[in-house]
Amino acid sequence: MPARWADAAGGVSRLASGALPLCLGWLCLAGLGMAPRRLEAQALELRGNLRIRTEAWDWFTPSVPADESYAFVGTILRGGIGAQRPRYAWRVDLAVPILLGLPDNAVAPPPQGQLGLGATYRAENGKQEVGLLVKQAFVRLRLGRQAGAATLRLGRFEFNDAEETEPRNPALSLLKRSRIAQRLIGSFGFTHVGRSFDGIELARSSPGANFTLIAVKPTEGVFQLDGLAELDAGLVYVALTKALFDAGAEGRLFALYYRDGRGVLKTDNRPAAVRALDSQNIGVATLGAHYLHTFPMGPGMGDVLLWGAWQTGDWGEQRHGAVAVAAELGYRPREIPLNPWLRAGYFHGRGDDSPGDDSHQTFFQVMPTPRPFARVPFYNLMNVRDVFAQILLRPSARWTLQADAHALRLAEPNDLWYSGGGAFDDESFGFVGRPGGGARSLAGLFDVSVDYHPSPRFGATLYLGRVRGDDVVRAVYPQGSGATFAYLELRRQF
């Protein structure tokens, strides 16, 4: 058996080793048998959900003995209560994240660092296994009586950029959720803790258009079970979204300003001694746009996705300037078995080619959810070029299959191989950088997932991803540059 398939089989085996507690949890879920409840006397709505995921990691081989291969179980139980009134609404959601079976020795000396997300959870939480969080606690006011009046939300809430509206066109809606949203601002919902934001949101919608403005501070969380406090960072985001061509297309213009006053050691390609002397704040402004369009194309439907962002500002003592662009094409033939959707695309996030000057040119991803764009999250969209092909199959309304292939290269060989999703505590920067070693070729990523939805309140996902590390990965992990990530996830709404 080829070594890479043996490694993949090992990942599946470790996944199976954690399946028993997950299946027991699923049996408990099935016993709940409840839909969201509405308490009529008080016009209150009770709502919640439970997610259980067994993750199996087989990280790149470190140079010292460590737990690079392991499985653990992560669970998050959420529940809340709220009410809707003609002039206002309110909601409070609590969450209990639980982490079981985390690896005890999955951190290698720099630059190899933490060996998968299990190592990150352990490093952030020590022996703590259970947390209690206020995920949301807000009131939403309607600023007027007329239809389409603006609304003002105040308090703690979750937010993902580009999800201010949902297109009526199902294909546009799916593309927006999976390939546009959360590139720069995300709730990091893939982790077992996630992040929220404290502040305000002003929104106004009219037929075919939406204006949204938020001014918020992020909370701790993401990998920390203690995720109640605010961070000394903040962002302001404004967006105008409009449906085009009889809702067959959509465009969005957005602007974002991010300030980071935590004073922690920044992750960039300068020498460590130079970075240690730079405690100045980060202030980065981002201007960007996206465009989505579906259209008839021969015996089927084609689609195009365009996204771009330009950045300027201050990176501590350096001036910051960067760009990122994405272009994707898709095609869905009609009346073909399994309803295939074929897609391909290219992403470029600029890197910094001169570590010794006074300019920082690495595209800064701010506070995203990395996982939609890096399904094995060993990289993000900073200093990277990603050429990918994708196929989605939907044999029935209950089943969705997806397979991706990515060829990943560093945009600049003198910059770093970046991963991570932004600030989540006041002690670490939130992004990790490993040296590129003067090479460009990062890795090939091949993965497949199966989603099953027997009802609107049940869901299950099985995922397997395999990484074949190239020159950049081999320079950091010369003992073994292949990695596998697999998981089985069960979800229940009640």
Image: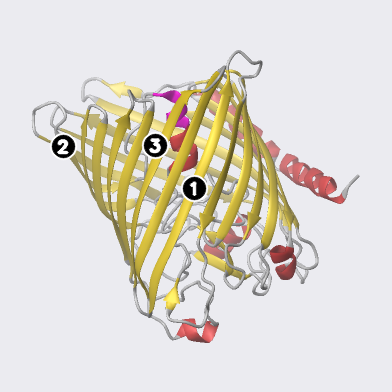
Q: Which residue is mark 1?
A: 326
Q: Which residues are magenta?
A: 169-174
Q: Nearer the viewer, residue 306 or 146?
A: 306
**Helix, strand or loop at mark 3:** strand
Q: Is residue 456 left or right of residue 83?
A: right
Q: Residue furthest top?
A: 335
Residue 256 rendering spot, x and y as whole percentages: 31, 56
In this view, the mark in front (3 or 2)? 2
Q: Quadrant of the C terminus?
A: top left
Residue 124 rendering spot, x and y as whole percentages: 53, 63
**Helix, strand or loop at mark 2:** strand
Which residue type carries mark 2? Ala
Residue 258 rendering spot, x and y as whole percentages: 33, 62
Q: Nearer the viewer, residue 229 or 112?
A: 112
Q: Which residue is mark 2?
A: 150
> How far apart in space, not on screen, are marks 3 and 1 (Cα)?
37 Å
Q: Residue furthest left?
A: 145
| Mark before the other along the chain sequence, 2 or 1 | 2
Residue 133's label in the rendered image is none
Which residue type carries mark 1? Ala
Which residue type carries mark 3? Gly
Residue 246 vs 362, above or below: the answer is above
Whether residue 405 is visible here, answered yes or no, is yes
> How far apart in space, not on screen, are marks 2 and 1 (Cα)?
32 Å
| Mark before the other along the chain sequence, 3 or 1 | 3
